[in-house]
Amino acid sequence: MLVEVIATSVEDAKRAEQGGADRLELISGILEGGLTPSWGLVNAVVKAVSIPVHVMVRPHSQSFCYTADELRVMKEDVRMIRELGAAGVVFGMLTPERQIDRYGLELLLTEADGLNVTFHRAFDEAADLLEAARVLLQYPQVRTILTSGGKRTAIEGADCIAKLVRMTKQTSLGVLAGSGLTEANAPEFIRRTGVQQVHFGTAAREEKQALRYVDAGRVAAIKRACMQTATLKSPMDRT
């Protein structure tokens, strides 16, 4: 069971690691769903922690459709993030028809050699999530889908997430469930879906407020709850 925590600062990163997080998603603009952090912040966080750092590459929050100029900027961001020593990048792009933007994806993948690539929650706005997953399976560099199952929260999207977990089982593509997960609801959600990677934002922060620091104690409690669940068999494992 892998627990990923959102970090927006060096302090967040240190606290998340102290609490037992397995991986960080480093972003800026948390109230906008995550934007590309500065190269200076990427450099500082990579040096400050020993756990993997996955960095958001998202130039704006207007949509997940990008112009040629924006894609070139994103490609340069991927190059710099790789050179700064991050473990991975997090991005996603769609066409106006809500299909995976293969051109944009392939362009960024040319700079992502050696990085773990997560396709972020742009996935949840695709016209057909199962078809979008089938497209991403054609790109072995994409190792993870971050998804709430097409719903506002992962709890609401649990049935779809369970389908995605079954679809990607024994492939190189993993499902990272996020949005609305807490220490309290994560155990049953994990048992229900069989997901092996979970993603936490405000639930891991002081007073569960987006603009407060990560709370190491909350991270530790989340990690304990998820790990205890991981020792139990999911309904899918019993079938």
Image: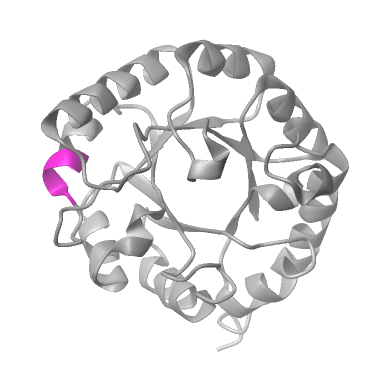
The answer to whether residue 18 is left or right of residue 130 is right
Image quarter where the N terminus lies is bottom right
Q: Is residue 129 above or below residue 35?
A: below
Q: Position of residue 16 (x, y in %)?
A: 74, 35
The span picked out in magenta is 101-105
Q: Residue at image x 85%, y 52%? A: 221
Q: Residue 121: within the magenta?
A: no
Q: Residue 102: within the magenta?
A: yes
Q: Nearer the viewer, residue 100 or 64?
A: 64
User: For residue 206, what is the image quadrant?
Assistant: top right
Q: Nearer the viewer, residue 194 or 147?
A: 147
Q: Position of residue 43 (x, y in %)?
A: 53, 12
Q: Residue at image x 25%, y 63%? A: 132
Q: Residue at image x 38%, y 42%? A: 61
Q: Is residue 77 above or below residue 231?
A: above
**Predominant SS along the magenta part:** helix
User: For residue 210, what is the image quadrant?
Assistant: top right
Q: Nearer the viewer, residue 133 or 56?
A: 56
Image quarter where the C terminus lies is bottom right
The answer to whether residue 208 is left or right of residue 2 is right
Q: Is residue 154 above or below residue 41?
A: below
Q: Position of residue 223 (x, y in %)?
A: 77, 52
The answer to whether residue 166 is left or right of residue 9 is left
The answer to whether residue 105 is left or right of residue 187 is left
Q: Position of residue 127 (x, y in %)?
A: 24, 70
